[in-house]
Amino acid sequence: MNFRRHPITVDRRGPRTTAPAAWRALAAAVASVAAAALVALTGCAGPPSTDAQPAAQVENTVVTLDEDLLYDLLVADIAAQRGRGATAVEAALRAAYRSRDRRIVGAAVRLAARVNDHARVIELARLMADIAPRDFRNQLILADAQLKTGQVAAALTVLVEVARRQPADQNGAAALHSIAELLAESAQSAAPEFAQSPPQILQQFRAAAAPWRSSAQLQFTAAQLALKLQRGEDFQRLIDQTLRLRPRWQAAAVAKLDYLSVRFPVQAGRFAAVFLRGFPAAHRFRIRYGGLLLDAGRPAQAAAQLDAVLRQDPQSSEALFAAAAARFEMAEYGAALQRMRRYLALNPRNDRARLFIADIHFELAEFAAAEDALREVASPAYRLDAQVALATVLAKRHGVDAGIRHLRQTAVRGSEDAVRVVLEQARLYHDYAAPARAKTALDEGLARFPAHPDLLYQRGLLAAQLDLLDLHERDMRQLIALQPHNAHAYNALGYTLADQTERLDEAFKLISKALKLRPNDPFILDSMGWAHFRRGGPGDNARAIAYLQRALAVREDAEIAAHLGEALWVAGRKREAREIWAKGKAWSPDNATLLDTLRRLSGQKSSAIDHRPAGAFAAAILISAPIPAAAR
């Protein structure tokens, strides 16, 4: 919000006179405090805020402070603090009309929404639209209140008109996304007598938009609504219609790519190739595709897409950052450093880039340079990240105890930071071959923060590595009870039962549950394939190969390659097995699981744990990473 000083005059219910300087200063201070308090009280409640505006849309206003306005602001503030909602709303309403100040009107809107006074929300939203007619969010506030009071037709009329006026560009797409989100939420949050089922709200929006079937903006909004309502077939049909109307609209193409990449990754690649062949200058789409390739473990392909953008637009910050990440994953650290330095030159205040540069120096064994980069991090948002990374550098330079000592001295802000420090201590101990000390750190963490999901998950993984199967099962089952939709917990326990016990029926049930929650997760597919391989019944090896091939199609991973190669080897398809293993070595030459598989099958003694799968222990024990939000 742009808090400019507004000239203030005082109206004493008569001819305008200039108030004494002391009174003007006191009145300004009191009004400022009262208005700020009212905004603070309502800042997190109700419909989307109308306070923040693009600079081009901010109207310069002059607040004329008279005794009545000051009185109304103070009454609204005090009544809101004391829980007297109706009194606060009436006072805020009067202040809104008196001042016509966007900050005060916005606070009044949110206060009315907080006490479910939808009639006042509608009234105030119309006032705000009159004050700032170019801000579409005022119309969203109006439509939201109409939906919550059963005025569905009126709300849809407003939203269709707003959608039609949006430009077919990135900003327009963001507005259309907001409209779809509002409608999707209305299907769940409306009062029971006004509730709409997902099919109803989608059908009603499409009916309201029917006179403008050739509007790509309306088709895109309907597609986004279908996606939010989990109606995949409707989404695909509507997004395809959007692209027929506007074939070059990158926001629509990105929406389709994102959808396919989660559910049909092979189709996502085909769609991207076709789209880029037709529109090679679609940089935003190409950057997104490169990011998805990187997430899928295909850094070389990602780098090719991102470098294509940089050849046309060398100053693209987004492409530079992602290209550096791709080169890092390819172990091309010099190229990664060069791109990240270019990014930092364009964004000198970005401490995330400094963290990345420190990571690159660490991989190059340039530990002093890594430490220097980390000590330059000043942003509070990355303070703890920098201290954690610095502990890793200190452990490398001076021994694990130096890193642990630094972590213990790191100031934390709240319990989540404290848990993060515990997890990082366990990671350091594990990285330096001290798993028993890692377990002790996690035990102490759980004593301080009982049943914390991240601590349970990491101790459970470590327990499996230490062959403490009872503890592994207890932690994972407790985590499943806390988070019944945590696919990673089902997968980890299911894999362990399949690999280290004869409880294969339980293992299949657990992995099947994980796969239902995350149908295209490559590591869960890997676990299902490994469970079939372990069971070894009629047809099991063929099913194992099928699951492992699906996993490898989603993510090029050396551990998945190790498992697929072994299943192919047992099936007598040794040439294919060698080809898969060769690819795995190219992706990760030092991968322990792959090297161990090759030693075992060549008859050499292995020092590694047999059959350690990506499905349960991706990249060893990922102690530093919390459970993904999607798994919670």
Image (cartoon, helix red, strand yellow):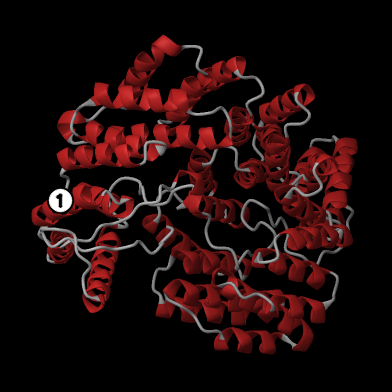
Residue sitting nearer the eye, 605 or 33: 33
Q: Which residue is pictured at 41% across the width and 80% down the height?
A: 448
Residue sitting nearer the eye, 166 or 231: 166
Q: Position of residue 232 (x, y in %)?
A: 49, 25
Residue sitting nearer the eye, 250 or 31: 31
Location of residue 623 with respect to 369 vertically, above or below: above
Q: Which residue is pictured at 29% across the width and 60% down the height?
A: 39
Residue 619 in which image quadrant: bottom right
Q: Which residue is pictured at 25% across the width and 57% down the height?
A: 64
Q: Position of residue 517 (x, y in %)?
A: 49, 41
Give the mark count.
1
Q: Which residue is pictured at 72% across the width and 63% down the height?
A: 609
Quadrant of the drawing holding the N terminus: bottom left
Res. 231 in view: no
Res. 216 in view: yes
Residue 83 in which image quadrant: bottom left
Q: Position of residue 465 (x, y in %)?
A: 63, 67
Could you tell me which secondary element the residue under label 1 belongs to? helix
**477 relative to 142 in the view: left or right:** right
Q: Position of residue 87 (x, y in %)?
A: 9, 56
Location of residue 547 with respect to 588 vertically, above or below: above
Residue sitting nearer the eye, 20 or 55: 20
**603 relative to 399 in the view: left or right:** right
- What residue type is disc 1 on? Arg
**Residue that numbered label 1 is attached to:** 94
Graded by Cα atoms within 10 Å as few (under 14), some (14 to 19) or many (20 or more), the crowding at tag 1 reads some
**19 relative to 593 in the view: left or right:** left
